[in-house]
Amino acid sequence: MNVDQLTTDFLPKELVFKLYKIPVGDYQQQIDLVSSYAETIKASVDPDVFAVKLHHQLGFCYWQSDVYPQAIEHFKIVIENLSAHHYPSLYFQVIGLLIRCNRLLSEFKESFYWIEMAFNNLRATASSFEKLNILKEYLDVLTDANKPFNKDYEPIIEYIISDLGFPQKLTDPIETIIAMRDANHVWNHKLSELAISRAQIEDTNQIKKDYKNFRKHCPIEWYRKYAEDAINKRKGN
């Protein structure tokens, strides 16, 4: 598989813009647009990469319109053609959507099938955020299916806590995952807002002050280090 092609954008920006302009729910128009473009580049793209990229995009069109059975079929083709180590972020995004789509259809047996596959391949990703996302999907399935937590997965929680520097301690695994999920959502959102709002500001001292305030109050070490790096980059200004 051509990994360079795999990690580049499949659709040009102008086509992405056209897709965003199509009304939500009009997935057939989106699919026709993607399929037509795909035919124009098919001959120049690695066949395995083409299958992964095309079916990921088609699955996403169905997913956005809540057409879960068709989304599942396309996402399954992605996983059939993609190894976790080739492109971990895409692999775990898609397998997370397979877990979720099946859960939303109450196909819990299928959800647990994809959950097990995801956990078996977690070593392929260095991102603890991707590991946390799979845990969140797992927790949602447990809740809807009324099933207990498998204690074999507790070391994953402990690893994420240590790697990202969460303040939580592993007590009840479900409560711990919920606390991590909620804290990560809050502070990821705050950091994103901070980065966007300060992108147009030229007052270096104000930017540093804002990041210091973020660092002071954030309970998650990974985000504190990110803020520290942002401050250090401006020390010479």
Image (cartoon, helix red, strand yellow):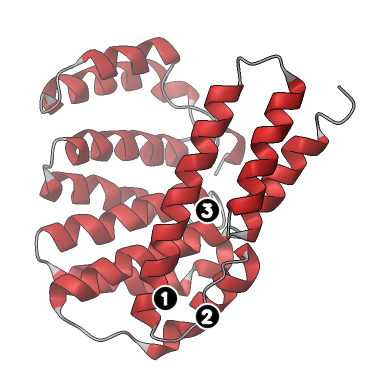
From the image, tell me which residue sits under label 3: 88
Could you tell me how far apart the alpha carbons at marks 2 and 3 are, in whole angstroms?
27 Å
Q: Earlier in the sequence, mark 2 or mark 3?
A: 3
x and y percentages locating residue 58 in the rendered image: 25, 34
Look at the image and tell me in which quarter the C terminus lies: top right
Q: Residues within 10 Å of mark 2 (few under 14, many from 20)?
A: some
From the image, tell me which residue sits under label 2: 169
Marks 2 and 3 in Cβ contact (< 8 Å): no
Label 3 or label 1, whichever lies nearer to me, is: 1
Residue at 27 percent of width and 56 percent of height:
98
Residue at 39 percent of width and 41 percent of height:
52
Task: Give the number of the disc on residue 13.
Answer: none
Marks 2 and 1 in Cβ contact (< 8 Å): yes
Residue at 15 percent of width and 71 percent of height:
144
Under circle 1, the secondary element is helix
x and y percentages locating residue 6 in the rendered image: 52, 37
The answer to whether 39 appears left or right of 71 in the picture is right
Q: Who is closer to the viewer here, 152 or 177?
A: 177
